[in-house]
Image (cartoon, grey):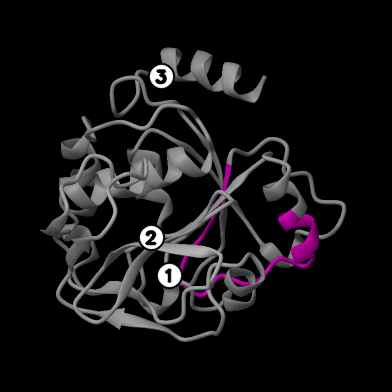
Amino acid sequence: MKFLLRLILAGSLGLVAGNAAALNILLAHGAPHLGYPDVAPRLVGLGHTVTPGDPLTWDAAFDYEPYDVVAFQYDSKNPADLAHLTAALDSGQIGVVFFRAFGHNATVIGLGLMTTTEEAWQSPTDLTVLDNTHPITSFLSLGTVNLGFTYMGWYLTPAPEASVLATGPSGPALVVHDTRRAVLVPYFGHAVNHGAENETGLTLTQNALLWAANSGSVPDEAASFGSVKSLFR
């Protein structure tokens, strides 16, 4: 039923990439006051509805039903009840996307994406694709592409139940869980040059969101790249 509603919504909004479905995204509060950008405008620019939320209020009674994806950005906190989020993820109710793991490392570890809190940045953002059989990376050839911005996530200790789809100059930059729809994306959300993300970077983000939502509609390119880019000028 949720997917049917997304298809209806996609038709009414005229969305980003061809037949891509509009998603309802619950975005954990971050720390733009430190100079790091709020991820919300770029997600809205990609055609999605974003609802900001405070993870400290996501307890055992919190209702994830209205949302397709729960996204975490820089310095957002861990949910008040991680087991409840995990249950919603494992039931297929939601997917989870992480834009940098700082601040909510316990969630990343608890969902089985990393084994420790070792997360850093790497530069330049030359992404080397190791696996393009996954829906997130299927639009890319194996090898190196640049994502446009300056700093990329570096996830030092991927968990045994996770796979590294792509690396940067220093190490893993795109990590997906093997059975859960949870993913650490390369976009680091650094205050410096975050708006220079190119079409490849935006498409990667879009694919990650759609895959996490199990939308059944992962595009080959972000048709609205120009409109999204204008949000950061």
Residue 168 vs 195, above or below: the answer is below
* Secondary element at image label 3: helix
Tell me which corner region of the image, top left, top right, bottom left or bottom right, holds residue 78: bottom right
Which comes before the other along the chain, label 3 or label 1?
3
How busy is the neighbourhood of tag 1: few (under 14 within 10 Å), some, or many (20 plus)?
many
For disc 3, the marked residue is: 13
The amino acid at mark 2 is Val
Residue 32, numbered label = none
Q: Secondary structure at mark 2?
A: loop
The question of residue 161 being in magenta is answered with no
Q: Position of residue 66 (x, y in %)?
A: 68, 35
* First to last magenta residue range: 69-86
**Image-based side of 69 in relation to 47, left or right:** right
Q: What is the x, y in percent for residue 190?
A: 30, 73
> Camera-side residue: 196 or 129?
129
The residue mark sitting in front, 3 or 1, is: 1
For residue 39, what is the image quadrant?
bottom left
**In this view of the protein, which residue sits in the foreground, 219 or 187?**
219
Residue 169 higher or lower than 163, as above or below = below
Labelled disc at residue 100? 1
Residue visible at 77% across and 67% down? 80
Q: Indicate which label's residue lies in the foreground, 1 or 2.
A: 2
Question: Which image quadrant for residue 210?
Answer: top left
